Amino acid sequence: MKEEKSKIKLSSLPYMNSSLELEKRVEDLLERLTLHEKFNLTAGKKWWYTKPIRRLGIKSFAMHDGPHGVRADREGKINSTYFPSSICRAATWNVELSIDFGIAIAQEIRDVGAHMLLAPGLNIQRSPMCGRTFEYQSEDPYLNKKLAVAVVKGIQSQNIAACIKHFICNNQETNRFTSSSEVSERALQEIYYPAFKAAVQEADAWSIMSCYNKVNGIYGSEDEHLLKGVLMSEWGFRGFVVTDWGAGSRTTSAESCINAGLTLEMPAASIYSIPRLTQAYKEGKFTEETLNDNIRRLLRVMFLVGLFDDGNALLKGSRNTPEHQALTREIAEEGIVLLKNEMNILPLDMEKVKKIAVIGPNANKKTHLGGGSSDNFPPYEIKPIVGIMNKCTEKVEVINSPSDADITIIFVGLTHQVGMDREGEDKVSFNLPEDQISLIIKTVKENPNTIVVLTGGSPVSMKTWIDEVPAVVQAWYGGMEAGNAIANIIFGDVNPSGKLPITFPKVLSDSPAHVSDRTFPGDEKVFYDEGIFVGYRHFDSKKVTPLFPFGHGLSYTKFTYDNLKISHEKVSGDDTFSITLDITNSGEQFGAEVIQLYIQDIECSVERPSKELKGFIKVRLKPKEKITIKFELTKEDLSFFDEINNCWKVEEGIFNILIGSSSRDIRLQHKIEYI
Ligand code: BGC
């Protein structure tokens, strides 16, 4: 009876009225909270939840990992769809697929009764050795930001909060709890910030996770300049900041975190313990007004995800549906990159190939476990060998002896085992394991028609064997349908269209982060000495030939680029100028191509990369079909960050507009002048 009464009372309060304006609901609820209740809202409990405030009907706000599927428990009792790793999704260069992925994973989050997904991971792939390269999207800020905006929009369209992470410069796992990323303002602005900034400004991300590491000497969770200054004042972030799990315990004080704008410490109170908060408050080290702003941000998101609304009125969730599983296959198929294909050995023709040897340690391996917070617990996972067998049925015999086969497919590469692609540690080697290298070399001797399929989420050295094999397929971690996706590519049911979102160096020392120990992995400090010259910006400008360049990926058909036209020869002020060109499928098969637009500033008062991606369009064309595509640019696309005046700037002069099929396969170019 008593409970009934209090329910009636609560439901009549203004903040419970879902038709009231959001900010009014927030303010009304905020005013009703006691200081102690506000303290309680600053830290989590039981790993994934905030503490409920029953008096006011504030339920626990639930958040789960992770980037590739919902990890609603840590034991795997709750199944969910295992999506391809982020680097694979990025290799699709397909913005719509990232929106669809965001929608699907949010539906899964909703279905387990949670409110926020701890993803996407937007750290730049600074080094191929970072254990979490597979969890991040790209080395390039433009590609990273386009996909970030798409994923966040997709997730939040379902009224589920996205949590973009890890802010910022968490670009390696070694010493991630203690090291300081020493990075210039220009590199932050041009390389590391853009995806976070765009996710905030263009997709209104509702949450951001601070990094474990320090940035220029200050922990991300207590960096007032970074959080209050850049994120909130400059970018207009309306959501709340949550620590990475356990990051709060390293910070110096409760007040520094409160004053910096950190709302929530997860998974439990450490720096935000009630005694610490009470003491600091009593000593006047932070004000209730400052705390209010942090709490207001969390309440806002609680309302946005419908925490106070009638469950029946919320969007419905769904999990492990055939649609989500089909989407994982589609992403994997579009993300697979055909790196090499001599004499068109691929696709395999079932009418001609009668015996296929399928060998290698990764042929029969699942990949959903071992990545750390990326662990997945799908209801099933199609292993590569199963995908190939499903396809071959009676038509082709699958054997395990290369010397007796027409073709050998060898599945090697990485997994999430210790020392490879996983959270908490960086890779121990840039090479494939020795036994895999020997296996490739031995196999090619037995059967020169050997196709290497690499699983893994980061570049590896291919120095000792790449020249010996006619074809190499980069299959990443392709999610629960990976085996079927790989088979569809190998047998040509799907024409490959993936393009590398990261440069594959020939040797590790060619990579800009690997010039010395101070640049990677560093010690107390990691020096980002390469500045803005990350990934292909370094390889191009310093004229180092990579093994496979950024944007590279072959197709079973050919595309012809012509008729480049630019709307203005001279551009000034805020003019928008357009670039059009014709693209024709000049081969024999249906296929998709990613047309990439780079700009080059011919002369500038500061050093600039010789190429910067500023646009891409993915098209699908039937044989002989031709279409005209159009890019639009403004002065922003021509600008750089001027460290002296602390602002973005474009200088007058000539710019080259480069159009290519990869960063090193430029097909058309034209100059314009900025006046
Ligand atoms: C990871 C985060 C993850 C969190 C919760 C941390 O160790 O860095 O990415 O979301 O754990 O599992």
Image (cartoon, rainbow, N blue to C red):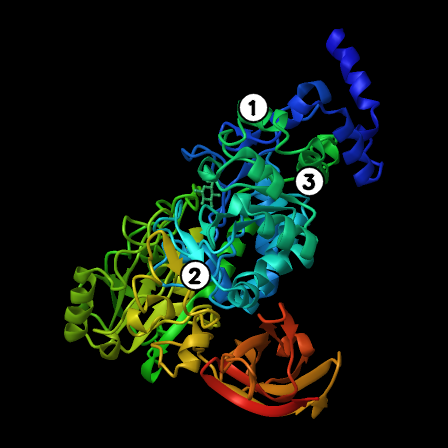
The x, y position of residue 101, in whole percent, is 57, 54
Q: Could you tell me if residue 82 is visible in this image?
A: yes
In the rendered image, the quadrant that contains the C terminus is: bottom right
Decide: is 163 above or below 286: below
Q: Which residue is mark 2?
A: 485
Label 3: how many Cα within 10 Å (few below 14, some 14–19, many 20+)? many
Q: Nearer the viewer, residue 234 or 437?
A: 234
Q: Nearer the viewer, residue 35 or 555?
A: 35
Label 1: how many Cα within 10 Å (few below 14, some 14–19, many 20+)? some
The x, y position of residue 426, in whole percent, is 33, 54
Task: Say which residue appears at 73% left-offset and 30% top-offset.
Answer: 308
- Report the mark closest to the observer, 2 or 1: 1
Q: Could you tell me if residue 318 is visible in this image?
A: no
101 sits left or right of 159 in the view = left
Rendering quarter of residue 413: bottom left
Q: Earlier in the sequence, mark 3 or mark 2?
A: 3
Tell me the number on the disc at residue 297: 3
Decide: is 622 above or below 301: below
| Kind of residue sitting beneath label 2 | Ala
Q: Secondary structure at mark 1?
A: helix
Rendering quarter of residue 182: bottom left
494 sits left or right of 622 in the view = left
Q: Secondary structure at mark 3?
A: helix
Give the CA distance from mark 2 to mark 1: 51 Å
- Report the mark closest to the observer, 3 or 1: 1
| Kind of residue sitting beneath label 3 | Arg
